[in-house]
Amino acid sequence: MVSARQTKRRARETLWTIALLAVLIAGGVALTRWLDARRESAVPTPTATSTVPAGAEQVTVGFARDGDTLDAVAGTDRVQLRLLGIDAPEMHGADGQPQCYAREAYEELRRLAPNGARLWVLDDVQRLDPYQRILVYAWTTDGRFVNAELAR
């Protein structure tokens, strides 16, 4: 038989557990909002023509690998750059053939960032993708936002 004292203790423990869960959930929501706001403030305004943001680094394009990846030289380092917000069809699909519109995406990136061109790039809060490519936003020397132009 459960005494009144045990019932009160269980009720108090239940209330504390609920209160703790509520605090944890509220903290998680607040942290998520804070991280989202921080991420949004780090992302440049996506306009087709804009000025190069402060903190951008100049690189020289080696060549376009496909419609969303460039080989470039930053300082003395050879790097692979993955354009944020762009998911171009693969040049080498599962069957080894280009996916639909892969060539068009590749040619458009080559038009915006031809071999030898200089670009201004700004990396993201998350610097690298799983393939160790640097995640960037890119601008031409005349201020065109490459990512937005490709998306358009």
Image: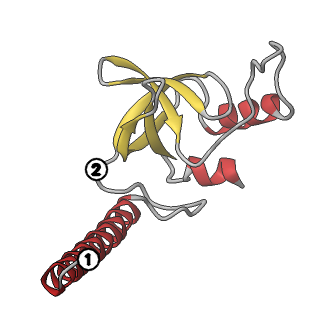
Element class at badge 2: loop
Left or right, 81 with respect to 2, comes to: right
Specify the amino acid type for callout 2. Answer: Gly
Residue behind mark 1: 14
Q: Residue at x 61, y 29 (%)?
A: 114
The x and y percentages for residue 135 are 45, 38
Residue 39 picture quarter: bottom left
> With respect to residue 82, does 143 lie above or below?
below
Mark 2 vs mark 1, foreground winner is: 1
Q: Is residue 136 left or right of residue 110?
A: left
Q: Measuring 55% from the left and 53% from the top, which residue is drawn there? A: 144
- Where does the image place residue 151, in percent across and percent down from the top left? 68, 51
Is 140 situated above or below 67?
A: below
Real-space Cα separation, disc 2 to disc 1, in angstroms: 52 Å
CB under 8 Å between callouts 2 and 1? no
Of residues 11 and 152, the one nearer the viewer is 11
The one nearer the camera, 69 or 6, is 6
Looking at the rendered structure, the secondary structure element under dot 1 is: helix
Q: Residue at x 40, y 31 (%)?
A: 59
In the rendered image, the quadrant that contains the C terminus is: bottom right
Q: Is residue 43 above or below residue 73?
A: below
Return the residue at label 2.
55
In the rendered structure, which amino acid carries the disc numbered 1?
A: Thr
